[in-house]
Amino acid sequence: MAGAAGGRARAASAGFDRLRPRTGRSPGSGEASPGSRPGVVGRDAHGKRALYSGERPPDPHGSGVTVNCSRCMRATTVGARRALTLLTPSLHLPIIRPRYPSLLRCPACRRASWVRLTLSVTRS
């Protein structure tokens, strides 16, 4: 049994010297060798990196009201509470003004203008 324990101790003290170093790097340095190309990451150069390229995907829109302004031509989605504060001082004339029927303060340009309201509800 003493021989087996001595063999394990020698194997544990051997370390990682039997592993091959990564290509493009010298065994002890953290820098890439001059022969390696910067920007190339293995065989998946554009697959996984394209997913994490810095552009964030748009957040899924929750429930709320989308306000399309006729003055600044922006579409702004606001939550339920913010929609109630926007709709408090408003005027709605759907028969007279069919395209932009509501007069209220636009959340994007902060001016009173005619807007189109669209309700969006998501189920969870």
Image (cartoon, rainbow, N blue to C red):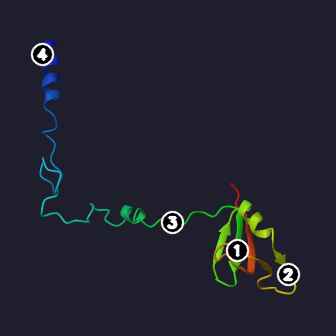
Q: Distance between the residues labelled 3 and 2?
A: 37 Å
Toward which corner of the image does residue 58 lie, by quadrant? bottom right
What crowding class fits label 1: few (fewer than 14 Cα within 10 Å), some (14-19), or many (20 or more)? many
Q: Could you tell which of marks 2 and 4 lies nearer the N-terminus? A: 4
Please tell me which residue lies in front, 114 or 7: 114
Q: Do the CB atoms of the residues marked 3 and 2 lie less than 8 Å apart?
A: no
The C terminus, quarter of image = bottom right
Q: In this view, does 11 lie to the left or right of 111?
A: left
Which residue position is annotated with label 1?
67
Q: Could you tell which of marks 3 and 2 lies nearer the N-terminus? A: 3
Q: Which amino acid does label 4 sit on?
A: Gly
Toward which corner of the image does residue 41 lie, by quadrant? bottom left
Mark 3 vs mark 2, foreground winner is 2
Mark 4, secondary structure of its residue:
helix
Q: Which amino acid does label 2 sit on?
A: Leu
The N terminus, quarter of image = top left
